[in-house]
Every structure is written in C-alpha cells, then in structure tokens.
Image (cartoon, rainbow, N blue to C red):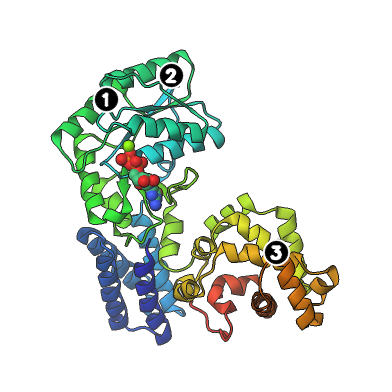
Amino acid sequence: MFEALSSKLNGVFDRLRRRGALSEADVTEALREVRVALLEADVALPVVRDLVNKVRERAVGQEVIRSVSPAQQVIKIVNDALVEALGGGEADDGKRGIDLNAPSPVPILMVGLQGSGKTTTSGKIALRLRTKDRKKVLLASLDVHRPAAQLQLQTLAQQAEVTSLPIVAGQSPMQIAMRAMDVARRELYDVVVLDTAGRLAIDEALMEEVAQVKLATNPHETLLVVDAMTGQDAVNTAKAFQDKVGVTGIVMTRIDGDARGGAALSMRAVTGAPIKLLGAGEKLDALEDFHPDRIASRILGMGDIVSLVEKAAANIDQAEAEKLAARMQKGQFTLEDYASQLKQIGKMGSLQGILGMLPGVGKIKQQLNDANLDTAILGRQAAIISSMTPRERRTPEILKASRKKRIAAGSGTSVQEVNKLLKQFDDMSAMMKRMNKLGQKGLMRGGLAALLPGAGNKRPF
Ligand SMILES: Nc1nc2c(ncn2[C@@H]2O[C@H](COP(=O)(O)OP(=O)(O)O)[C@@H](O)[C@H]2O)c(=O)[nH]1
Ligand SMILES: [Mg+2]
C-alpha cells in the first residue's frame, strides 16, 4: 500500500530539496503537486483540502522560506499533517489497539461487508489476545447466511488454539449471540468475539440485524472491517456503518495488496472512527497495530524503521545479531557469517517484505523485483556454504574450478550458482565497507539506496 503516493511525494520533495532557498512560489508549486498526488491516491477531497491548507499555513507561519533547510521543514510539516490525518493527534491517544478495559467477558462485535475479512480478522484477534495478552477467548459465528461460515470460524479457532462456540443448527444470530455471552459468563471467558454476517453491499436488513445484536450484547468494541483495496468505497461503507450502527474502531485489511492508501488517510476525518488494526495477509499472525506516525513516514519514504526493528527483534537471535554486527564492523565478515545471516533472514520471512520497510527503498523497489529475490534462493545458498570446508569458508580465494565442482555436487546446485554466491558475497563485503564508512546515522539518512554500488554521497534528505 502507499507505493505510488510515496514515490510521487518523494519526487516532489526531491525537486524541492534541489532548490536550496525556497520562494513562496516554490512552496505553492510543491503543495499543488502534493495535492495532485493525494487525489491520485484516492484520498477524499475534503481531507486533501484540509491537509494542504494546514501545511500551507504552517509553512508560511514558520517562515520556512528563510530557514536554513527549507525543504526538510516542508517535509516535516507535511509529515505532521499526515500523522494528524491518520488519527495521530493527541485527541486520539488511548484510542489505539483493542480496548479491553471493561468487566469480563468483554464482547467485541465484528461488522462489515461480505468478504472484507471479518472472519479472518476474528481469528487473528483471538490469536493475538491469547498469546500476547494471555486472555481466554471465545469465538462465535453469527453468520447463518452462508452455509460454511460457522465452520470457517471453527477452523480458524482451532488454528488460533482458542474455543469456538459449538454450532447449533437453526439458531438466529441473536440467539447465537445470547448463547455466546451465556457460555462466556459461566465458563469465565475474558473476551467474546462475535463475528457477524456481511452482505455484498450495505442494505437495511444487514444494518438491522447488526444493530439488534449490538443492542443485545452491548459490545465494548464494535470493529468495522474494511478492505483497503476498495479505496473510496471503504470510506463510504465506514460512513454508513458509523451512522447506522456506530463503530468504535476500524480494521483495514489487505494492506499487503497494492491499494493506493487514500482510504486510510480519509477514514479518520470522514468517519470520526480511528483505524485500530491492519490486516497484512491471510495468515493468522498477519495483524498489525496501526501507528499513524509510522505510516506517515512509510508514505514519505522514510521507512518504517520501528516496525522493522520490532519484527527483527521478534525473530532474530539477539546475541547472534550482535556478534554479526561486531564482525561486520571489524571487516571480518566471512562466508560462515553470511550463512548464519541467511538463516536469520529466512526466519524473518520474505525479503521483499523486510526491504519494503527500509527507508529509501521505494526508489529501488523495481530493481529488487527485477532481481527476483526469493527466500528459496537463500536456502540454496546456505546449502552451498555448508558444502564448503571450514578453510574454504574463511578464505574463499582458494576456490578454484575443481573445488567449485565438488561444492556444487555436494549441495545439489551448479557451478554457476556457486560463482553467483561468491560474487554476491564479494558485493556484500564491499557494501559493508561502505556501510561502515557511512556509520549508523548515515545509513538512516541515506537509506538503503546509499548502500547500492555507485550511490556516492547523495542522500534523499
Ligand atoms: N491478502 C489478504 N487477504 C485477506 C486479509 N484478510 C482476509 N483476507 C482474505 O479475504 C477473504 C475473505 O475473508 P473473510 O474473513 O472470509 O471475510 P468475511 O466475509 O468478512 O468474513 C479470505 O480469503 C481471506 O483469507 C488480509 O489482510 N490480506
Ligand atoms: Mg465471515
């Protein structure tokens, strides 16, 4: 999500930066381009207008034009305005994440159109509450319209290792909801997630059914699930649900797709409801908290460093990582270290996913796609390295034709692949030398692009 918007805004700011001193006309021109970029990303018109006006006021008020680093200041102001539009203002503090601050069992009602991801998200929430918050969770499907819907939730409950309410044929959504609350009270559940049926479009019958269940169960959270891929329609849907049912928060799913992202930026202003969670895939662990500041910096191409670090911390062996970092610093990085790093990367999931979170990567995304990075290749590379002798790993210079042939045979690969790995290792060592020269700060500023061959000292900011 946000890729097109991000690269457009980066273009605007690149041009602005090259200017040095800015005239008021420069700022006006840049803001006009920002406006077009936002509209193209499907951000609602009133939201765009508000955002651009805010930036203009602040840019003038802060005398950006005469400041020492005018472009950075404009970018900072745009960043702050984006954070606010995304619901990052102080008024929204405490409204992020699922609120469980109520007497048990806490009912959570899931609402939304058919196919938006309600059932999947119910499973994701159950998994998160069980593992992270150590809650006893009951899942109940109120979807009596689609034959397999209740079974779908039952399967997800098994995967999340939580209980699902036993299916009783012939019950109405209201009867199921009451039974769920009853069981939860008797068996001391902490949370009950009520997954409702959707319709293909908003209709009265759906709203009525949902409103009745809401009235009867008095949910502490009513979470509206919307599909980010539907763009402006997601915002209209949210507005309708907010007006007719009332929601406490929004879950935006399919942000792993190439949605333009405008819906996320419009949601808060149009519906008044905060986005609380993001669905980033079909698997049960693909649920993210919504952090306005991180999303804003992702849009502005500054990368979602914090998310990356969190993801890395959850998967990477800390001691191992520190050891590696120290060896890199000293320029002692060997093929053995490379193999160990391959293993760590494998644990973190797809390379593209990780690289997408790094700063400056928007620009080289295409290169990455062309390079066709794939975790399967990492496995083959690890196999090649493990077919080497310790001495070969320490001093790859000794690898001549016959050794390469032996290694290829031993790892079930080809001599070409062995050569490719060695070349890549060489490139990587060269990259590390550049990285050391730049230092950690330089890496943050210059982004990944600074590490690419021939990047010189050009920085995006
Ligand atoms: N890529 C992706 N697919 C999702 C996400 N959330 C749900 N889905 C898929 O969307 C489809 C419909 O989801 P479902 O939960 O049944 O929607 P419901 O009708 O609202 O209950 C399923 O195939 C899900 O696997 C997400 O965040 N990313
Ligand atoms: Mg469903």
**Does residue 120 appear in this view?**
yes
> Could you say which disc has been placed on residue 213 in the image?
1
Pointer 3: what residue? 383
**Three-letter amino acid code at the position of disc 3:** Ala
Q: CA distance from mark 2 to mark 3?
A: 51 Å
SS at badge 3: helix
Q: Quadrant of residue 333?
A: bottom right
Lateral position of residue 263 relative to residue 80, left or right: left
Tell me which image quadrant ligand 1 sits in.
top left
* Residue that appears at 38% across and 81% down: 16
Q: Earlier in the sequence, mark 2 or mark 3?
A: 2
Q: Which residue is mark 2?
A: 184
Q: Residues within 10 Å of mark 1 (few under 14, many from 20)?
A: many
- The residue lying toward the viewer, choosing from 190 and 91, is 190
> Which of 448/165 is in front?
165
Which quarter of the rendered picture does the N terminus lie within? Answer: bottom left
**Residue type of the residue flagged with mark 2:** Ala
- The span from disc 2 to disc 1 (Cα, nearest Å) is 16 Å
Q: Earlier in the sequence, mark 1 or mark 3?
A: 1
Compared with residue 273, is residue 297 higher up or lower down, i.e. above or below? below
